[in-house]
Image (cartoon, rainbow, N blue to C red):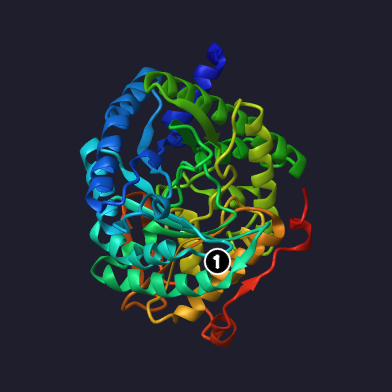
Amino acid sequence: MINLSRNEIIETVRMITEHHFDVRTITMGISLLDCISDDKNVVANRVYDKITRYAENLVETGDKIGAMYGIPIVNKRVSVTPISLIGASSLGYLEIAKALDKAAKATGIDFIGGYSALVHKGATEYEKVMLKTIPEALATTEKVCSSVNVASTRAGMNMDAIKEMGALIKEAAYLTKDRDSIGCAKLVVFANAVEDNPFMAGAFHGIGEADKVINVGVSGPGVVKTALELIPDGDLTAVCETVKKTAFKITRVGQLVAQTASKMLNANFGIVDLSLAPTPAMGDSVAHILEEMGLEQVGSCGTTAALALLNDAVKKGGIMASSHVGGLSGAFIPVSEDIGMINAARAGSLTMERLEAMTAVCSVGLDMIAIPGDTSQEVISAIIADECAIGMVNNKTTAVRVIPAYGKGVGDEVDFGGLLGTAPVMPVSKLSPAKFINRGGRISAPIHGNKN
């Protein structure tokens, strides 16, 4: 068990009370491989029973740990084995989606992830069936989240799947048009998806994982910004050192929470994800960290370089503080979930093109971005393809979570409430990539992907 010194405890209390520090999530990963059946009702019942049995005390345990250490634990979540596999024999995917939602409500968790498919090289017939159910599954459930991996550095890019995801995102937007197209906020398209991600909407429980695993995601943009405020004239080397030291302290707390939760829930300790995950609250913004480094506003020239510095320093500082660091780990840049990003998008300094450049060096990708509702499915597919290319060539995880807000245009706003926040509808190029997208097929892996 990790031990914290008196000074570390005092510093942690200050981070919590003054700088919005929290443990963003305790996520329990649950294997559903033993729930497979060729009867859709049997598999749905098995899924519900196993989740409610394993996660029965997850929320209560999270609250106990929060009270024990005085650390806010914002979310308690569950991730499961990709449902494309679990429903392969029965094809009862929508029944499983309803069972997942019912189990999430019964256990009191915030979200359940894993309505997912891994089709980066090709899709089987059962996976093709599953993909078509995603919009309805997201529209008819409250807590279910979905993700699809369509590219990897080793396999290349499945352009047929990327083409279909553009259409599925449009359908999800239409089916939830009465709620600002919120279905799309629960759907992520990945390149190089990781199997131990504790954050939604992209979490799923990898098939290489144990039966029951605890993954913890920490946060603390406000803590990092406050630390940088103490060195207003420091050079960028000093900035790096300050971020590293702060990330170390934050991750130490995550390690403590992860170890305690694993023991109390009789589960394997998976990883600590040390990503800086913002919220819409003032003082909890990754954008404001970049501005504290010296940018007039995020989106200006220099933004990508500042983000690269931040992401690298967070990883270097955090990796020494935990025995198992994983997940995504770095800095998130979700527009609707970060007040600094929201303000920059409203001001026009933060554009889609700048965000795309930033994704080459940040933790994930184009995240929680509202775009005009009349954006074509081919343009959405092309956005996904561009982002997957960045991930594939740079051997990193990238993702797209865009919301084509039905009936809304540039300058309008969407409001999802809570951690999902608010976002202005941002312009995208109307030039057509339709011929390119409709070619289909595969884009081969980069030459450096061929290594053993």
Say left or right for 213 vs 194: left
Question: What residue sits 23% from the left and 60% below the top?
Answer: 140
* Image spot of residue 80 (x, y percent): 40, 43
The answer to whether 238 is drawn above or below residue 117 in the figure is above
The answer to whether 283 is drawn above or below residue 212 in the figure is below
Question: What residue sits 27% from the left and 41% below the top?
Answer: 46
Tell which of 297 and 150 is nearer to you: 150
Identify the residue under disc 1: 350
Question: What residue sits 32% from the left and 50% below the top?
Answer: 418
Q: Which quadrant would residue 411 be assigned to in this image?
A: bottom left
Residue 302 visible in the snapshot: yes
The answer to whether 108 is drawn above or below residue 128 in the figure is above
Callout 1, which amino acid? Leu
Q: Residue furthest front?
A: 38
* Image spot of residue 366 (x, y percent): 53, 62
Element at badge 1? loop
Residue 351 visible in the snapshot: no
Tell which of 401 and 344 is nearer to you: 401
* Image spot of residue 359 (x, y percent): 61, 59
Question: What residue sits 49% from the left and 68% below the top?
Answer: 347
* Image spot of residue 221 (x, y percent): 52, 42
